[in-house]
Image (cartoon, coloured by chain):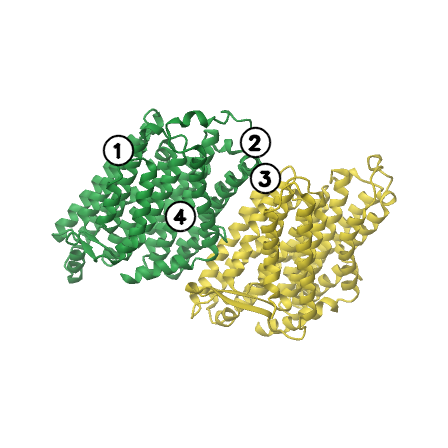
Chain colours: A yellow, B green
Amino acid sequence: MFPILSSLIFLPVAGAVSILFLPKENKRLIRSVALMVTGLVLALTIVLLSQFNCTSSQLQFVENVAWIPHFNIWYFVGVDGLSVGLVFLTALLGFIACVASQGIEHNQKEYYVLYLLLMTGMMGTFVALDLFLFYVFWEIVLIPMYFLIGLWGGPRREYAAIKFFLYTLAGSVVMLVGILAVYFNTSPHTFNMLAIQKAAAFFDVRLQVILFLAFYLAFAIKVPIFPFHTWLPDAHVEAPMPISVLLAGVLLKMGGYGFFRICFPFFKEAAHYLAYPLAVLAVINIVYGACVAMAQTDFKKMVAYSSVSHMGFVMLGLASMNITGFNGALLEMFNHGIITGGLFLLVGVIYDRAHTRDLNQFGGLSGQMPVYAFFLTMCSLASLGLPGLSGFVGEFLSLIGAFPVFKVLTAISTVGLVVTVGYFLYSLERVLLGGLNPSCAKYADMNGREILTIAPLMALTFIVGVYPTAVLKFQEAAIHAFIHLL
Amino acid sequence: MVLMAGAFGRYKSLAGELSLAGLILAAFVLPASFNAGPAAFSGMLVNDGLAMIFRPILILAAGMIILLSLGDKNLPAEDGPEYYFFLLVATVSMLLAVAANNLMMIYIALESISIVSYIMAGFLKRDVFSSEAGVKYFLFGALSTGITLYGISLIYGLFGTLDLNLIREILAAGEVNHLALSVALVLALVGFAFKCSLVPFHMWTPDVYQGAPTPVAAFFSVAPKAVGFAFFLRVFVENFQGVFSYWTPLAGFMALLTMTIGNIAALKQENVKRLLAYSTIAQAGYIFVGLAVGTPEGIKATLYYIFIYTLMNLGAFGCVIAVANTIKSDRIEDYAGLYKREPLLAIVLTVSLLSLAGIPPLAGFLAKFFILASAVEAKYVLLAVAVVLNSVIALYYYAKIIKVMFLDEPKPLMVAPTDFSKNDGSQCWPLACRTVAVQLVLMGTLIANLFLGLWPHPIIGWLTNLLHLG
């Protein structure tokens, strides 16, 4: 069988290596190689989706080859309903952000090499089924990200880059010790996630809780969960626009995915034991993120904090530990990737023209840039959870799942929803409505390329909002199996 | 082994190229030495797995150092023959040292390595820092080897022999005062710890590394350290682990202190060589974790780490030499914009540093992973946590150099790039070849760092085979 997952992982590497050998001056060629590779990855992912068997909860497209037999480490990859949506999200945003990288003006060669390596890391994280391999991909993401923020970012890029790097590394090295502890507590020793799922059920609760927390730290920093979120606004604000899109759209999902793939199925008893604290932190995320977003004047920072708030719904759905909650959490991850990716694209569009992101510097743009106004309104409405658009479905399912389990907490979290509506409408008002700010009089409307990048995301938002089954059908079988595990 | 010593002796008065040839010859003779008898000089030297593992590492390190020395334009050319002579004498002593199976022999080897090292550290006669380095190294070294000698004499008093095989037999028969033995061992440990620059015997390291010529510092950072660890393996882990019940707590504590102090001190450094000196202290701490654990897995992890450490550290020092060749500076701020000036060099240094930091998929990650695995397996989880937290601290200062190279704007150079065509008259190698010598090392380490991180089998297989030999 054609090794489709390996192609998804290693095509970008091949692209990066070939770009290394291209002359620096030939910017068009470099860019087209990168576009071709990401486009090919997207096409392959669509093939993958079309061949994916939605009724099966089994792993599909599995490849399993010994890598370091001395430590029983395997190159073991595969997808199931939990990961296939995120693989698609990675490929889609990877392509779109590559198209949107037009604005990168200096050092294109290095940019696209790092960009493609980043793709490899993200893709690998979602398909790895060997804990060691998972860790390697997880870490591979850090280095390109450090350079992408540090070299092409905004004024405080160095601070943001190193903060991101150290924060995430701190979490992941603790996870590494956790991984080793899991390995040595299974017999025969293994990194195979499926084998560990069976074996870890027999760990005693104390060990489970410790290990759960070790992994939790890594994932919580990535998601990010309050109080580990402080790297996120800095990284988002300073990162160049396409990288912000990937950061919000894909990297945060790596944390959420870790809970689905590792924390919950491995340490079931610990998950039951810790569900309440998890939910409390999730609600803090929702409310706190929303309130802080409300106070922002920087457009990008506002969207960054809205991510904190939205990822809270993912965590709330997870903590409720029932089918509805899990479905909601997984769907919310997908939706958040699409919507927030779109929002960052749109912030980038206005930044390209205004070279500022201060919400108070705009005004009355709806007349000046009607197409932009349309997309920004749709995106904001989707993000604040308007029924009929995708954001609503995920959040709604999460809340329904959570309500029977944590009544008070769910009630509190709806405060966050209200505030979310508040800050999005407030930002729309400041950007689009009112009299035209004279400094904005010369802004051109969105060009074809910009529309091309945002339109597919908007289309998906509509489709999922009206017909959520389009996404849910991929994950349902896996979620059912998941619940049985618990 | 005698043959190998001969191979060096013959070329001693000639310049670097010939020493390199001698080393290559020695490397070719190496496989033959595997088949040589198990012991020589009535059991003074043994030819066991440990010796066979360390010999190639040392020869490789010495070969790379010679290449780096050839390429270092800040070394005085007129003293070349003496320099390479000392380098080779040190190498021969080390090759003997790793095979020594008698405490007397171990002491002699230790002392001969030290004496040559003192001279090499002070090799830049006209440089105050270099002379200071030599004297400092000498004073600290003499004291610590003296203490080791005292410990060894106590061991002789307890056993009536210094032959480790006989000692092992006596130990097996029992009837040794454990407390006295522990005291003797702790004293003997001092000299070894000094060579490995373990805390609290590390004070000399930054000053010596900064003052000594860079290739010499690079040499100190790998070869004598490897030998020190070989001593630890042979004496403490192989022979006394069973009776020296304080070994694991003591070594674990030392490892913890070493990596933490090394890393924290490195944070504030502004000189690359000084920073790397502290980083090597921290790295020694990681290596020592494997020894503290002392299990077969721990030993294998230690050996693996030493091998990889040699490659990545020499890669980093090689870059420092290459940079100093053009800008004559070791200050980190002068690395600003290196990427714009010499992109390849910046990339090699970045890979070496990230590998030292233990970032996958580079070789340093797997090495650290094996160390961690051995610690977790033996249930020293706290030690493992200490290692990973230290890795985070370490990343900060490694990333600091990377940041300066890539993100900072290049400043106008204080010293204009030197015109080397003038200074090179006394050298028989043309300029291009000398640059090639450094580049050879850099490319070698780059490829090894990338390749061994993904495909560690050759090294693991090699170590496993030799360790099974005994």
Tags 3 and 2 touching, CB below 8 Å: no
User: Relative to B145, is B60 on the left or the right?
Assistant: right
Residue B379 against residue B354 in the figure, above or below: below
Query: Residue A149 occupies which quadrant of the picture?
Result: top right
Residue A4 against residue B156 in the figure, above or below: below
Same chain shared by disc 3 and disc 2 = no
Which amino acid does the dot numbered 3 rest on?
Glu
Q: Secondary structure at mark 2?
A: loop
Tags 2 and 4 touching, CB below 8 Å: no
Q: Which residue is mark 2?
A: B410
Q: Identify the residue shown where x is 65% and y is 66%.
A: A326
Tags 3 and 1 touching, CB below 8 Å: no
Query: Mark 3 or mark 4, which is nearer to you?
Result: 4
Q: Identify the residue shown where x is 67% and y is 61%.
A: A88
Q: Which residue is mark 1?
A: B139
Which amino acid does the dot numbered 4 rest on?
Tyr
Other-residue count near label 2 (Cα within 10 Å), few / some / many at <14 / 14–19 / ≥20: some
Same chain shared by disc 3 and disc 1 = no
Other-residue count near label 3 (Cα within 10 Å), few / some / many at <14 / 14–19 / ≥20: many
Residue B379 versus residue A475: which sits nearer the camera? A475
First reached walking from the N terminus: tag 4 or tag 1: 1
Q: Which residue is mark 3?
A: A158
Q: Secondary structure at mark 1?
A: helix
